[in-house]
Image (cartoon, rainbow, N blue to C red):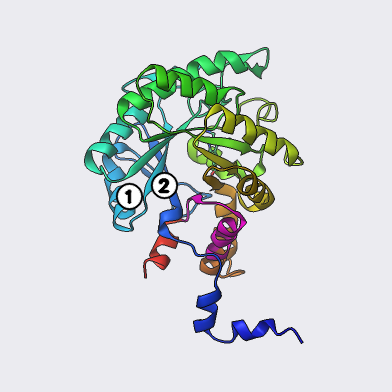
Amino acid sequence: MFRTRRLRKSEGIRRLVRETKLSVDDFIYPLFIEEGENIKTEIVSMPGIHRFSLDRISEELEEVVTLNIPAVLLFGIPSDKDEEGTETWNDNGIMQQAIRFIKKNYPSLYVITDVCFCEYTSHGHCGIIHENDVDNDATLVNIAKQVISHAKAGVDMVAPSGMMDGTIDMIRQSLDNTGFVNLPIMAYSVKYASAFYGPFRDAADSAPTFGDRRTYQMDPSNRDEGMREATFDDQEGADILMVKPALSYLDIIRDLKNNFDRPIACYNVSGEYAMVKAAAEKGWIDGERVMMESLLSMKRAGADIIITYFAKEAAKILNK
Ligand code: PBG
Protein backbone atom coordinates (compact mmCIF):
# COMPACT_ATOMS: atom_id res chain seq x y z
CA MET A 1 0.00 0.00 0.00
CA PHE A 2 1.17 3.56 -0.59
CA ARG A 3 1.32 4.99 2.92
CA THR A 4 1.39 8.80 2.64
CA ARG A 5 0.40 9.10 6.31
CA ARG A 6 3.91 8.05 7.44
CA LEU A 7 5.15 11.57 6.77
CA ARG A 8 2.32 13.17 8.75
CA LYS A 9 2.76 11.27 12.00
CA SER A 10 4.23 14.00 14.22
CA GLU A 11 4.95 17.70 14.16
CA GLY A 12 8.65 16.91 13.77
CA ILE A 13 8.24 15.14 10.45
CA ARG A 14 5.54 17.56 9.32
CA ARG A 15 7.99 20.40 9.86
CA LEU A 16 10.64 18.58 7.81
CA VAL A 17 8.43 17.98 4.78
CA ARG A 18 6.55 21.28 4.87
CA GLU A 19 6.70 22.79 1.36
CA THR A 20 5.48 26.34 1.91
CA LYS A 21 6.37 28.69 4.71
CA LEU A 22 4.99 32.12 5.35
CA SER A 23 7.30 34.82 6.57
CA VAL A 24 6.97 38.43 7.69
CA ASP A 25 9.30 39.16 4.76
CA ASP A 26 6.40 38.37 2.40
CA PHE A 27 4.14 41.18 3.57
CA ILE A 28 3.26 44.66 2.40
CA TYR A 29 0.86 46.55 4.70
CA PRO A 30 -1.55 49.06 3.12
CA LEU A 31 -2.02 52.45 4.82
CA PHE A 32 -4.79 55.00 4.28
CA ILE A 33 -3.57 58.53 4.86
CA GLU A 34 -6.13 61.28 5.02
CA GLU A 35 -5.49 64.98 4.65
CA GLY A 36 -6.35 66.83 7.85
CA GLU A 37 -5.47 66.74 11.53
CA ASN A 38 -5.99 64.41 14.44
CA ILE A 39 -7.72 61.71 12.40
CA LYS A 40 -7.81 58.05 13.39
CA THR A 41 -11.04 56.64 12.00
CA GLU A 42 -11.75 52.94 11.97
CA ILE A 43 -13.19 51.71 8.68
CA VAL A 44 -16.51 50.15 9.63
CA SER A 45 -16.29 47.22 7.23
CA MET A 46 -12.60 46.60 8.03
CA PRO A 47 -12.26 46.18 11.80
CA GLY A 48 -8.74 47.04 12.98
CA ILE A 49 -7.93 49.15 9.89
CA HIS A 50 -7.97 52.94 10.18
CA ARG A 51 -7.57 56.10 8.17
CA PHE A 52 -4.89 58.25 9.76
CA SER A 53 -3.88 61.85 9.33
CA LEU A 54 -0.12 62.36 9.12
CA ASP A 55 0.12 63.72 12.67
CA ARG A 56 -1.31 60.43 14.03
CA ILE A 57 0.35 57.96 11.65
CA SER A 58 3.42 57.38 13.84
CA GLU A 59 1.62 55.06 16.25
CA GLU A 60 0.85 52.81 13.29
CA LEU A 61 4.33 53.08 11.78
CA GLU A 62 6.00 52.28 15.11
CA GLU A 63 4.06 49.04 15.24
CA VAL A 64 4.81 48.14 11.62
CA VAL A 65 8.52 48.69 12.16
CA THR A 66 8.58 46.84 15.50
CA LEU A 67 6.87 43.87 13.86
CA ASN A 68 9.57 43.91 11.18
CA ILE A 69 7.13 44.27 8.27
CA PRO A 70 9.34 45.40 5.38
CA ALA A 71 7.02 47.62 3.37
CA VAL A 72 3.91 49.78 3.31
CA LEU A 73 1.62 50.65 0.39
CA LEU A 74 0.22 54.18 0.65
CA PHE A 75 -3.21 55.40 -0.39
CA GLY A 76 -3.91 59.11 -0.14
CA ILE A 77 -7.28 60.59 0.72
CA PRO A 78 -7.17 64.26 -0.29
CA SER A 79 -9.54 66.95 0.98
CA ASP A 80 -9.91 68.36 -2.54
CA LYS A 81 -11.11 66.40 -5.53
CA ASP A 82 -11.64 67.60 -9.09
CA GLU A 83 -12.44 66.25 -12.55
CA GLU A 84 -8.86 65.23 -13.36
CA GLY A 85 -7.46 64.50 -9.92
CA THR A 86 -4.86 67.26 -10.20
CA GLU A 87 -4.01 66.87 -6.49
CA THR A 88 -2.20 63.63 -7.41
CA TRP A 89 0.73 65.58 -8.83
CA ASN A 90 0.77 68.40 -6.26
CA ASP A 91 4.29 68.22 -4.81
CA ASN A 92 2.75 69.19 -1.48
CA GLY A 93 -0.18 66.79 -1.71
CA ILE A 94 -1.03 64.28 0.99
CA MET A 95 0.86 61.42 -0.69
CA GLN A 96 3.99 63.49 -1.24
CA GLN A 97 3.91 64.71 2.37
CA ALA A 98 3.42 61.16 3.60
CA ILE A 99 6.35 59.83 1.54
CA ARG A 100 8.66 62.54 2.90
CA PHE A 101 7.46 62.03 6.47
CA ILE A 102 7.92 58.26 6.44
CA LYS A 103 11.28 58.27 4.65
CA LYS A 104 12.57 60.88 7.11
CA ASN A 105 11.33 59.26 10.31
CA TYR A 106 11.36 55.56 9.38
CA PRO A 107 14.12 55.29 6.78
CA SER A 108 14.28 51.49 6.95
CA LEU A 109 10.63 51.12 5.92
CA TYR A 110 10.18 50.52 2.19
CA VAL A 111 7.57 52.94 0.85
CA ILE A 112 5.39 52.05 -2.13
CA THR A 113 2.65 54.31 -3.50
CA ASP A 114 -0.55 53.28 -5.21
CA VAL A 115 -0.63 55.32 -8.39
CA CYS A 116 -4.22 56.00 -9.38
CA PHE A 117 -6.86 58.74 -9.59
CA CYS A 118 -10.03 57.27 -8.15
CA GLU A 119 -9.52 58.72 -4.66
CA TYR A 120 -8.76 62.10 -6.24
CA THR A 121 -11.42 62.54 -8.92
CA SER A 122 -14.86 63.99 -8.25
CA HIS A 123 -16.43 61.17 -10.32
CA GLY A 124 -14.38 58.39 -8.68
CA HIS A 125 -13.03 56.91 -11.93
CA CYS A 126 -9.37 56.04 -12.46
CA GLY A 127 -8.58 58.73 -15.03
CA ILE A 128 -9.91 61.50 -17.23
CA ILE A 129 -13.50 61.12 -18.42
CA HIS A 130 -14.35 61.75 -22.08
CA GLU A 131 -17.76 60.74 -23.39
CA ASN A 132 -18.68 58.74 -20.31
CA ASP A 133 -15.58 56.58 -20.28
CA VAL A 134 -12.01 56.88 -19.09
CA ASP A 135 -9.76 58.25 -21.84
CA ASN A 136 -6.74 55.95 -21.82
CA ASP A 137 -4.08 58.07 -23.49
CA ALA A 138 -5.05 61.38 -21.87
CA THR A 139 -4.86 59.61 -18.50
CA LEU A 140 -1.35 58.32 -19.25
CA VAL A 141 -0.06 61.88 -19.41
CA ASN A 142 -1.37 62.55 -15.90
CA ILE A 143 -0.02 59.23 -14.60
CA ALA A 144 3.45 60.40 -15.63
CA LYS A 145 3.00 63.66 -13.71
CA GLN A 146 1.83 61.79 -10.63
CA VAL A 147 4.68 59.31 -10.70
CA ILE A 148 7.36 61.95 -11.11
CA SER A 149 5.91 63.87 -8.19
CA HIS A 150 6.05 60.73 -6.01
CA ALA A 151 9.58 60.05 -7.20
CA LYS A 152 10.73 63.56 -6.32
CA ALA A 153 9.22 63.12 -2.83
CA GLY A 154 11.44 60.05 -2.38
CA VAL A 155 9.20 57.02 -2.87
CA ASP A 156 10.95 53.62 -3.08
CA MET A 157 8.59 51.96 -5.59
CA VAL A 158 5.44 52.91 -7.50
CA ALA A 159 2.45 50.65 -8.06
CA PRO A 160 0.08 51.83 -10.81
CA SER A 161 -3.39 50.35 -10.27
CA GLY A 162 -5.56 52.05 -12.89
CA MET A 163 -5.41 49.39 -15.61
CA MET A 164 -4.76 51.86 -18.45
CA ASP A 165 -2.99 50.34 -21.45
CA GLY A 166 0.59 51.46 -21.88
CA THR A 167 0.96 52.52 -18.24
CA ILE A 168 4.22 50.71 -17.55
CA ASP A 169 5.84 51.94 -20.73
CA MET A 170 4.81 55.52 -19.94
CA ILE A 171 6.03 55.34 -16.33
CA ARG A 172 9.33 53.65 -17.19
CA GLN A 173 10.14 56.23 -19.85
CA SER A 174 9.14 59.17 -17.65
CA LEU A 175 11.23 57.92 -14.72
CA ASP A 176 14.23 57.16 -16.91
CA ASN A 177 14.05 60.59 -18.54
CA THR A 178 14.02 62.36 -15.18
CA GLY A 179 16.92 60.45 -13.65
CA PHE A 180 14.96 57.84 -11.69
CA VAL A 181 16.36 54.85 -13.58
CA ASN A 182 16.61 52.83 -10.36
CA LEU A 183 13.03 53.32 -9.18
CA PRO A 184 11.12 50.03 -9.64
CA ILE A 185 7.53 49.50 -10.75
CA MET A 186 5.12 46.98 -9.28
CA ALA A 187 2.35 46.62 -11.85
CA TYR A 188 -1.22 45.81 -10.92
CA SER A 189 -1.05 43.62 -14.03
CA VAL A 190 -4.03 41.35 -13.68
CA LYS A 191 -6.65 43.35 -11.86
CA TYR A 192 -10.23 42.22 -12.04
CA ALA A 193 -13.43 44.29 -11.87
CA SER A 194 -14.26 42.73 -8.52
CA ALA A 195 -16.99 43.02 -5.91
CA PHE A 196 -14.31 42.25 -3.33
CA TYR A 197 -13.16 45.91 -3.40
CA GLY A 198 -16.36 47.11 -1.67
CA PRO A 199 -14.92 47.95 1.78
CA PHE A 200 -11.87 49.66 0.21
CA ARG A 201 -14.05 52.08 -1.67
CA ASP A 202 -15.60 53.14 1.65
CA ALA A 203 -12.14 53.35 3.19
CA ALA A 204 -10.65 55.43 0.39
CA ASP A 205 -13.83 57.23 -0.62
CA SER A 206 -13.26 56.12 -4.21
CA ALA A 207 -16.48 54.52 -5.47
CA PRO A 208 -17.42 55.70 -8.98
CA THR A 209 -20.37 58.10 -8.97
CA PHE A 210 -21.65 56.67 -12.29
CA GLY A 211 -21.10 53.41 -14.12
CA ASP A 212 -18.48 50.91 -13.03
CA ARG A 213 -14.89 49.97 -13.83
CA ARG A 214 -15.58 47.21 -16.34
CA THR A 215 -14.20 49.11 -19.34
CA TYR A 216 -10.74 49.07 -17.77
CA GLN A 217 -10.58 46.36 -15.09
CA MET A 218 -10.73 42.75 -16.23
CA ASP A 219 -13.70 40.40 -16.53
CA PRO A 220 -13.49 37.77 -13.74
CA SER A 221 -14.30 35.12 -16.37
CA ASN A 222 -11.00 35.57 -18.16
CA ARG A 223 -7.78 33.68 -17.59
CA ASP A 224 -5.97 33.87 -20.96
CA GLU A 225 -6.47 37.63 -20.96
CA GLY A 226 -4.59 37.76 -17.66
CA MET A 227 -1.57 36.26 -19.41
CA ARG A 228 -1.87 38.91 -22.09
CA GLU A 229 -1.97 41.72 -19.51
CA ALA A 230 1.03 40.29 -17.68
CA THR A 231 2.97 39.80 -20.94
CA PHE A 232 2.55 43.45 -21.89
CA ASP A 233 3.60 44.68 -18.43
CA ASP A 234 6.56 42.30 -18.42
CA GLN A 235 7.69 43.51 -21.85
CA GLU A 236 7.16 47.16 -20.93
CA GLY A 237 9.51 46.66 -18.01
CA ALA A 238 7.47 46.10 -14.85
CA ASP A 239 9.75 44.81 -12.09
CA ILE A 240 7.03 42.96 -10.16
CA LEU A 241 3.75 41.60 -11.52
CA MET A 242 0.65 41.61 -9.34
CA VAL A 243 -2.64 39.72 -9.34
CA LYS A 244 -5.66 41.24 -7.62
CA PRO A 245 -7.79 40.08 -5.82
CA ALA A 246 -5.98 37.04 -4.44
CA LEU A 247 -8.23 34.34 -3.00
CA SER A 248 -10.61 33.86 -5.90
CA TYR A 249 -7.71 34.17 -8.36
CA LEU A 250 -5.16 31.65 -7.10
CA ASP A 251 -5.15 30.02 -10.56
CA ILE A 252 -4.01 33.31 -12.09
CA ILE A 253 -1.25 33.68 -9.49
CA ARG A 254 0.03 30.22 -10.46
CA ASP A 255 -0.19 31.06 -14.19
CA LEU A 256 2.02 34.10 -13.67
CA LYS A 257 4.45 32.23 -11.44
CA ASN A 258 4.88 29.51 -14.08
CA ASN A 259 5.23 31.86 -17.02
CA PHE A 260 7.19 34.91 -15.92
CA ASP A 261 10.64 35.28 -14.51
CA ARG A 262 9.64 38.16 -12.24
CA PRO A 263 8.62 38.29 -8.60
CA ILE A 264 4.86 37.79 -8.35
CA ALA A 265 2.73 39.74 -5.89
CA CYS A 266 -0.92 39.35 -4.98
CA TYR A 267 -3.33 41.70 -3.25
CA ASN A 268 -5.41 40.13 -0.50
CA VAL A 269 -8.12 42.79 -0.86
CA SER A 270 -10.52 44.52 1.50
CA GLY A 271 -13.51 42.22 0.86
CA GLU A 272 -11.40 39.15 1.56
CA TYR A 273 -10.34 40.71 4.85
CA ALA A 274 -13.89 41.75 5.73
CA MET A 275 -15.32 38.27 5.13
CA VAL A 276 -12.88 36.63 7.53
CA LYS A 277 -13.41 39.32 10.16
CA ALA A 278 -17.20 39.17 9.93
CA ALA A 279 -17.43 35.38 10.14
CA ALA A 280 -14.92 35.28 13.00
CA GLU A 281 -16.87 37.94 14.89
CA LYS A 282 -19.95 35.75 14.66
CA GLY A 283 -17.96 32.83 16.00
CA TRP A 284 -18.55 30.84 12.81
CA ILE A 285 -14.88 30.36 11.95
CA ASP A 286 -11.57 30.54 13.78
CA GLY A 287 -10.45 33.90 12.36
CA GLU A 288 -6.78 33.47 13.16
CA ARG A 289 -6.51 30.04 11.55
CA VAL A 290 -8.50 31.07 8.47
CA MET A 291 -6.27 34.13 8.09
CA MET A 292 -3.08 32.05 8.21
CA GLU A 293 -4.50 29.36 5.90
CA SER A 294 -5.60 31.99 3.35
CA LEU A 295 -2.22 33.72 3.34
CA LEU A 296 -0.47 30.37 3.05
CA SER A 297 -2.64 29.43 0.07
CA MET A 298 -1.57 32.60 -1.75
CA LYS A 299 2.06 31.77 -1.19
CA ARG A 300 1.54 28.15 -2.22
CA ALA A 301 -0.19 29.35 -5.40
CA GLY A 302 3.01 31.21 -6.27
CA ALA A 303 2.93 34.65 -4.69
CA ASP A 304 6.34 35.88 -3.57
CA ILE A 305 4.80 39.00 -2.05
CA ILE A 306 1.42 39.43 -0.34
CA ILE A 307 -0.21 42.82 0.13
CA THR A 308 -2.53 42.31 3.08
CA TYR A 309 -4.49 44.13 5.80
CA PHE A 310 -3.65 41.09 7.94
CA ALA A 311 0.08 41.89 7.87
CA LYS A 312 0.32 43.08 11.49
CA GLU A 313 -1.81 40.26 12.91
CA ALA A 314 -0.02 37.59 10.92
CA ALA A 315 3.37 39.07 11.81
CA LYS A 316 2.52 38.77 15.51
CA ILE A 317 1.92 35.06 15.04
CA LEU A 318 4.95 34.48 12.81
CA ASN A 319 7.27 36.44 15.12
CA LYS A 320 6.34 34.31 18.15
C1 PBG B 1 -7.49 51.72 -7.08
C2 PBG B 1 -7.39 50.63 -6.08
C3 PBG B 1 -8.45 49.88 -5.55
C4 PBG B 1 -7.88 48.98 -4.64
C5 PBG B 1 -6.52 49.20 -4.64
N1 PBG B 1 -6.24 50.22 -5.56
C6 PBG B 1 -9.90 50.00 -5.74
C7 PBG B 1 -10.54 49.82 -7.04
O1 PBG B 1 -9.94 49.41 -8.03
O2 PBG B 1 -11.74 50.11 -7.06
C8 PBG B 1 -8.66 47.96 -3.86
C9 PBG B 1 -7.98 47.38 -2.68
C10 PBG B 1 -8.85 46.60 -1.78
O3 PBG B 1 -10.03 46.31 -2.05
O4 PBG B 1 -8.34 46.26 -0.72
N2 PBG B 1 -6.82 52.87 -6.65
> Pointer 2 and pointer 1: residues touching (CB < 8 Å)?
yes
Residue type at tag 2: His
SS at badge 1: helix
Which quadrant would the N terminus be assigned to in this image? bottom right
Q: Nearer the viewer, mark 2 or mark 1?
A: 1
Instruction: Give the label on residue 50, or none.
Output: 2
Instruction: Choose the circle earlier in sequence order: 2 or 1.
Output: 2
How far apart are the two marked residues, 2 and 1, measured between alpha carbons?
Answer: 9 Å
Instruction: Give the label on residue 60, or none.
Output: 1
SS at badge 2: strand
Residue 91 coordinates in the image, percent (x, y): 33, 21
Q: Quadrant of residue 245?
A: top right
Residue 80 at least partly seen: no
Residue type at tag 1: Glu
Q: Residue shown at 44%/52% (left/top)?
A: 27
95 vs 282, left or right, is left
Asked whether mark 1 and ligand 1 are closer than 8 Å, the reply comes as no
Q: Which residues are magenta?
A: 291-310
> 14 and 73: which one is in front?
14
Residue 15 coordinates in the image, percent (x, y): 50, 76
Label 1 Cα crowd, 10 Å radius (few <14 / some 14-19 / many 20+): few
Q: Residue shown at 70%/30% (left/top)?
A: 214
Q: Residue furthest left?
A: 105
Residue 254 coordinates in the image, percent (x, y): 65, 51
> 219 and 85: which one is in front?
219
